[in-house]
């Protein structure tokens, strides 16, 4: 089990990796467009690589098989041991994943909403299969059976793909992903910080500290 951070902000990534609980980073075009719309993608990713460890997912934005493979080659060259090519789910995407896998390139098939999509991606050779929790819920469905059935079939078939669950909006989404067998919840910095906090914990710490400060006083 591992946590990835879903961010493209090198400063915040560096700070959160200092907690010792993170094992990788995921990015996507939407995150980068919001956090650093004018940044050079290559320089931004290299900054992230410098302040983190583990796999760093970088998403393809082209749409044809040839273009996707060319784009993947550029990203992979930034750090072949750590860059994971994030491939959107499609017929072209599956072909790209299959070809990249044969070259030893790590892949993360993204935008998955159903177990059958994740299974296809795993069969194609994906290193990670990314289920979008919040977007499944947006459609009115419970994401828990999707995660559970995906984990069940990957384990049954002996497939190596790891389940990433992302697009999480609430603390409970993280808890449910863990309970349902996700290998890697990828979460935004605000949600990661919520995992630390509990009102009873704060109250208890304050009680202990106050008792210590007031020791010996009448």
Image (tube, rainbow, N blue to C red):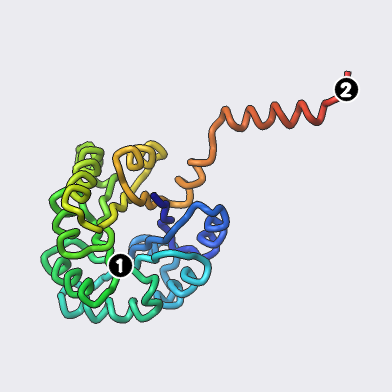
User: Quadrant location of residue 118?
Assistant: bottom left
Q: Secondary structure at mark 2?
A: loop
Mark before the other along the chain sequence, 2 or 1: 1
Label 2: how many residues lie within 10 Å, few (<14), some (14-19) or many (20+)?
A: few
- Residue 202 locus on image (x, y percent): 61, 32
Q: Which mark is residue 59?
A: 1
Decide if residue 15 is on the left or right side of residue 101.
Answer: right
Decide if residue 44 is on the left or right side of residue 68.
Answer: right
Residue 167 shows in this picture: yes
Residue at (48, 41) in percent of width and height: 195
143, 100: nearer the viewer: 100
How many marks on residues? 2
Looking at the rendered image, the quarter that the C terminus falls into is top right
Q: Nearest to the eye among marks 2 and 1: give it.
A: 2
- Residue 159 locus on image (x, y percent): 21, 56
Question: Is 191 rendered above or below residue 121?
Answer: above
Question: Is 73 rendered above or below residue 159?
Answer: below
Label 1: how many residues lie within 10 Å, few (<14), some (14-19) or many (20+)?
A: many
Decide if residue 203 is on the left or right side of residue 124.
Answer: right
Residue 114 shows in this picture: no
Decide if residue 66 is on the left or right side of residue 5.
Answer: left
Q: CA distance from mark 2 to mark 1?
A: 61 Å
- Residue 119 locus on image (x, y percent): 16, 54
Residue at (33, 50) in percent of width and height: 183
Q: Which mark is residue 129?
A: none
User: Quadrant location of residue 32?
Assistant: bottom left
Residue at (18, 61) in percent of width and height: 89
Q: Secondary structure at mark 1?
A: strand
Q: Which mark is residue 217?
A: 2
4, 62: nearer the viewer: 4
Q: Residue furthest top?
A: 218
Residue at (22, 48) in percent of width and height: 155
């Amino acid at each position: 089990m591992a946590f990835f951070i879903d961010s493209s902000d090198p400063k915040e990534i560096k700070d959160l990796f200092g907690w010792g609980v993170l094992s990788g980073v995921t990015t996507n075009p939407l995150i980068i467009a919001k956090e650093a719309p004018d940044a050079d993608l290559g320089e931004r990713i290299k900054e992230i690589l410098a302040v983190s460890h583990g796999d760093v997912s970088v998403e393809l934005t082209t749409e044809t098989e040839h273009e996707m493979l060319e784009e993947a080659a550029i990203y992979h060259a930034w750090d072949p041991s750590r860059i994971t090519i994030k491939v959107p789910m499609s017929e072209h995407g599956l072909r790209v994943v299959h070809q990249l896998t044969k070259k030893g390139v790590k892949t993360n098939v993204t935008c998955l909403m159903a177990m059958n999509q994740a299974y296809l991606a795993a069969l194609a050779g994906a290193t990670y299969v990314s289920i979008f929790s919040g977007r499944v819920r947006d459609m009115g469905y419970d994401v828990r059976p999707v995660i559970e059935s995906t984990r069940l079939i990957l384990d049954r078939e002996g497939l190596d793909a790891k389940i990433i669950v992302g697009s999480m909006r609430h603390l409970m989404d993280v808890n449910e992903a863990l309970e349902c067998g996700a290998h890697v919840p990828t979460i935004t910095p605000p949600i990661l910080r919520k995992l630390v906090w509990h009102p009873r914990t704060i109250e208890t710490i304050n009680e202990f500290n106050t008792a210590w400060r007031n020791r010996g006083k009448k």
